[in-house]
Image: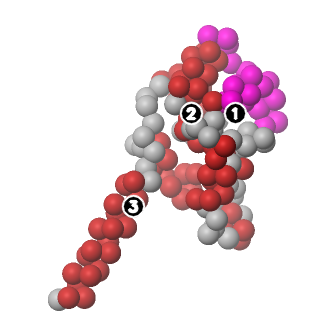
């Protein structure tokens, strides 16, 4: 009986930790539709406001793709991203890649290189492979 109680307590602690890791993302239809048409709409708090400004200002060469938006949608999305951006150097990367931020590296340091190339994962940018919809707070 004591063993069962310990196992249940461990399960509750793990569930509480998983809930604490869930990102709360405000709803923004334009961001979800435009950014989500090519990849998951990454939660704005995963990059700094300065990184979002640089990223949204260079959509004509967005990681090798022209992802240009009309000026109105670009402005709406940028305002949303800036307002909800992460703060501090831990959410900033010169490459503008979330996976290059100190936060990402810290949170994922236990993942082996072999796991990142697993055909079901494929890359560090495929959050849904491991987190499902949790990343969007759905």
Does any portion of residue 54 appear in the rendered image?
yes
- For the point 69% across and 55% down, the residue is 123
Element under label 2?
Answer: loop
Q: Is residue 35 left or right of residue 65?
A: left
Residue 106 included in the magenta stretch of the image: no
Q: Looking at the image, do the residues carrying marks 2 and 1 touch, with CB atoms under 8 Å apart?
A: yes
Residue ID at (63%, 35%): 48
x and y percentages locating residue 5 in the rendered image: 21, 81
- Please state the extent of the stretch shown in magenta in the rendering: 50-72
Secondary element under disc 3, as helix, strand or loop, is helix
Q: Which residue is mark 2?
A: 85
Q: Residues within 10 Å of mark 3 (few under 14, many from 20)?
A: few
Q: Identify the disc placed on residue 51.
A: 1
Q: Residue at x 64, y 65 (%)?
A: 109
Mark 1: few/some/many CA within 10 Å (<14, 14-19, 20+): many
What is the distance, in whole Å, between disc 2 and disc 1 at their CAs? 9 Å
Disc 2 crowd rating (10 Å Cα; few below 14, some 14-19, many 20+) is many
Give the side of residue 69 with respect to residue 62, left or right.
left
Instruction: Work out which quarter of the rendered image holds the C terminus and state it.
Output: top left
Residue at the outermost front position: 88
- The residue at the far left in this view is 1
Q: Position of residue 137 (x, y in %)?
A: 42, 43
Q: In this view of the protein, which residue sits in the foreground, 42 or 36? A: 42
Residue 17's disc number: 3
Would you place residue 128 above or below residue 61 in this image? below
Can residue 39 be seen in this snapshot? no
Residue 126 image point, x, y percent: 62, 51
């Amino acid at each position: 009986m004591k063993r069962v109680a310990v196992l249940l307590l461990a399960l509750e602690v793990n569930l509480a930790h998983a809930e604490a890791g869930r990102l709360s993302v405000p709803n923004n239809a334009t961001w979800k539709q435009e950014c989500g048409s090519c990849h998951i709409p990454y939660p704005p708090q995963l990059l700094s406001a300065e990184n979002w400004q640089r990223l949204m200002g260079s959509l004509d060469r967005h990681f090798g793709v022209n992802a240009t938006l009309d000026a109105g949608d670009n402005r709406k999305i940028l305002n949303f991203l800036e307002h909800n951006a992460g703060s501090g150097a831990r959410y900033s990367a010169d490459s503008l890649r979330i996976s290059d931020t100190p936060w990402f590296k810290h949170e994922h340091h236990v993942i082996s290189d072999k796991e990142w190339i697993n055909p079901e994962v494929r890359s560090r940018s495929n959050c849904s492979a491991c987190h499902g919809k949790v990343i969007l707070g759905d």
